Amino acid sequence: MRKVLLLFSAMVIGLTSVMAQQAWAPAGNRIKTQWAEKVDPANPLPEYPRPQMVRPTWQNLNGLWNYAITSEKATDFKAEGKILVPFAVESSLSGVGKTVGKEKALWYERTFTVPKKWKGQNILLHFGAVDWKTDVWVNGKHVGQHTGGYTPFEYDITPYLKKKGEQTLRIRVWDATDDSFQPRGKQVECPSGIWYTPVTGIWQTVWMEPVATTRINSYTTVSDIDAKTLTVNVNTKNLQASDIVKVEILEGGKGYNPEKPSGTTIAAVNAKNGKAVFTLPEVKTWSPDNPYLYGIKITLSRNNKVVDVVNGYTAMRKISVCRERNDRKYSKRMALNNESLFQIGPLDQGWWPDGLYTAPTDEALRFDIIKTKDFGFNMIRKHIKVEPARWYYYCDVEGIMVWQDMPCIGDHSGRVNATRTKEIAEATKNKWASDSFIGGTDCNIPQAGKDNFYKEWKEIMEALNPFQCIVVWVPFNEAWGQFDTEKVVEFTRQQDATRLINAASGGNYHNVGDIQDCHHYPQPAMNAYEGKFVNVLGEYGGIGYAVKGHLWQEDKNWGYNGLKQNGQEVLDQYEVFAEMLKHYVHCGTSAAVYTQTTDVEIECNGLMTYDRKVIKVDEARIAKINKSIIDTMYKTIVK
């Protein structure tokens, strides 16, 4: 009988997958990655979405949903087709490939059932990220509204559920993209140059899980490698005075997987007032050469009965500023674990030709990180985009430091077009003083826009705080939407004092933060040095090579240094730039960011094509060049 049931289950799963394939196909005829063919519309992105806080029981709600695009004022909709969640409606993998815009709204609907074994527990509905304003209904009742396109949010939908049977989930999304003051990164309604296709709606996993009324909400960690201490701050909900929150630190290693917790317990402490402090007899630090991860297990108990358990991980690492032992004027360096380390990495836009903001598969998401490491880089600048949690987990696992940008709210161009009003264009227009303290101006952002910036930036930092790969926060880039820089830096420091702050990457500097960041294309150059700060080259390069058959548009492509004819020419130029960069390293430059990981739309500046099917350069050779750059900087040990 058991064999018959297993065979029947397999037949049902197979039939469901076939039916889903018949109801869905990628939209459009642009280039796609090799992983597009691996997308299963019956089960897209099935991986557990929250590796920092794992519970074993959950249900993925990704898949084919009903959708419609209506006027912005509409209060109801009639389904006009199927959309594959979690791919944005503009993307090929959504199966739709349509734009929405400020005057319209995007609707989603699907049914689901709550497993019987979840009875008696609270049901949390999770959204990885939805761009931008999201309203949620369950069984016709409004559950809540969320604004922000880059962070996870959740609702306890228990009061809205029927006692049994199918439940109906409906979502409405409104997104003004660049005709607004909302953080939107490189999305614009009229893509061109360095500005890309808009992303509207659900673009990360939708899922639900059963939890207790009293539960663990989140945790953060603070490591002190000098004192050999690790502090775990635990946030709980509905905790009673007699409840016990036990935190365990587990022996881990490279590639530690919190979904399959292993390793012996090194230490266990009951948290007091939400805080557990550990003194480790031996500290194993995290670094690009040895990305050691510790396991974390948090157990909430009441009257000797376990109420909630989550598994996660952390690392012991320290990012700081040190000064070289000589007395040269420009000698501040970034240090990792009390040793100066030159940081070099690519500008990583995180865009995909088939999924736009969303990688087609988890394997694809990890691929760019692995290739970055193969190229000999030790850092990634995540450029005005925020990734799903699994991306940062893979950076932790692979040993890649991350500079995290805040998605911008303007572009200082003042462009007025068919979708951007004059009011918005004028308010976000300002003067960019490239690589200078003098002459730059702020954008005229209304207070509501500023308030929302702070709200979303805080949510981003809170969501990403547990990932130890992040070593630098970057609030502003090239004056895009820049305002009140001193206050923004102070706010950033209040949220997280453990990481460095690159206040204004590429100009419009203020006397705040830890880093002064110059941009120069195509060759590396430092047009400004300031001894108070760590001096870095935040962008350079952009050596273009348009590989036929792997282009977003065959007839319109560009690179900052023109277009080379083959990968050999690209790498020859890269090596010339490397020798120039070494001179600046000797003069005090402490990091460099090369543009860029992949081509993006009509930008052909990538070390890989947009579809990731062609690696343009010899991996061994570029890795050797990058190692020589890293080794150029004198090693300073902090005592």
Image (spheres, rainbow, N blue to C red):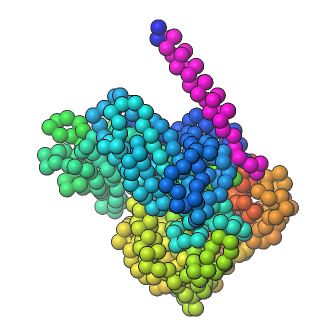
Q: Is residue 21 magenta?
A: yes
Q: Is residue 400 magenta?
A: no
**Residue extending furthest toward the top:** 1
Question: Residue at (55%, 71%) from the top-left corner?
Answer: 180
Q: Position of residue 239 (x, y in %)?
A: 20, 49
Residue 12 visible in the snapshot? yes
Foreground residue among 599 and 513 = 599
Q: Position of residue 576 (x, y in %)?
A: 76, 70
Q: Position of residue 520 (x, y in %)?
A: 67, 77
Drawn side of residue 507 relative to residue 293, left or right: right
Position of the C terminus, as image quadrant, is bottom left
Number of marks in picture:
0
Above or below 39: residue 92? below
Foreground residue among 311 and 114 = 114
Question: Residue at (50%, 40%) from the top-left corner?
Answer: 110
Question: Residue at (49%, 72%) from the top-left corner?
Answer: 475
Above or below 550: residue 15? above
**Quarter of the image where one finds residue 343:** bottom right
Q: Position of residue 279 (x, y in %)?
A: 27, 53
Residue 569 visible in the snapshot? no
| Magenta span dominant secondary structure | helix
Magenta-drawn segment: 3-31
**Quarter of the image where one finds residue 351:** bottom right
**Quarter of the image where one finds residue 164:** top left
Above or below 524: residue 555? above
Question: Residue at (74%, 64%) from the top-left corner?
Answer: 603
